[in-house]
Image (tube, grey):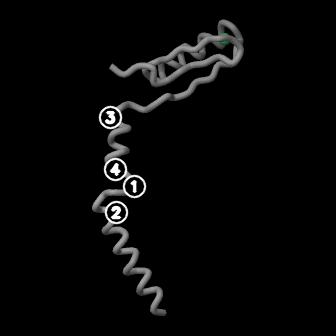
Amino acid sequence: MSEGNVVVTCRDCTLEESFENLGRARVALDDHELETGHDVDWRIIRVAGGVEQAGADAGVCGIPGCENTDSALLDWQNTDGEK
Ligand SMILES: [Zn+2]
């Protein structure tokens, strides 16, 4: 379903190939380096959709829980300010 998450690119030739996970990408990377002696790099295009969605759901703002944290901080700041 998800593919092309990890892209292997070669600095010494036009090789550019995408893989669905880092394990397969590293195998291809190692193979190309062994076969050609080229300097191969890789990069992660994006994490799995579910992981990305979970990160968005846990977002740093717009969540009611964040407001509770803010009020607790305000109480602490008020106490500190009275001194
Ligand atoms: Zn190459």
Q: Count of labels shown?
A: 4
Q: Are marks 4 and 1 in contact (CB under 8 Å)?
A: no
> Mark 4 sits on what residue?
58
Circle number at residue 66? 2
Q: Residue at x 37, y 44 (%)?
A: 55
| Among numbered discs 3 and 4, the one appearing first in the sequence | 3
| Among numbered discs 1 and 2, the one appearing first in the sequence | 1
Q: Are marks 1 and 2 in contact (CB under 8 Å)?
A: yes
Q: Residue at x 65, y 16 (%)?
A: 10
> Mark 3 sits on what residue?
50
Q: Are marks 2 and 3 in contact (CB under 8 Å)?
A: no
Q: Of helix, strand and loop, which one carries label 3? A: helix
Q: Which amino acid is tagged 1?
A: Val
Circle number at residue 60? 1
Q: Which amino acid is tagged 4?
A: Ala
Image coordinates of residue 75 in percent, x first then y, are 37, 80
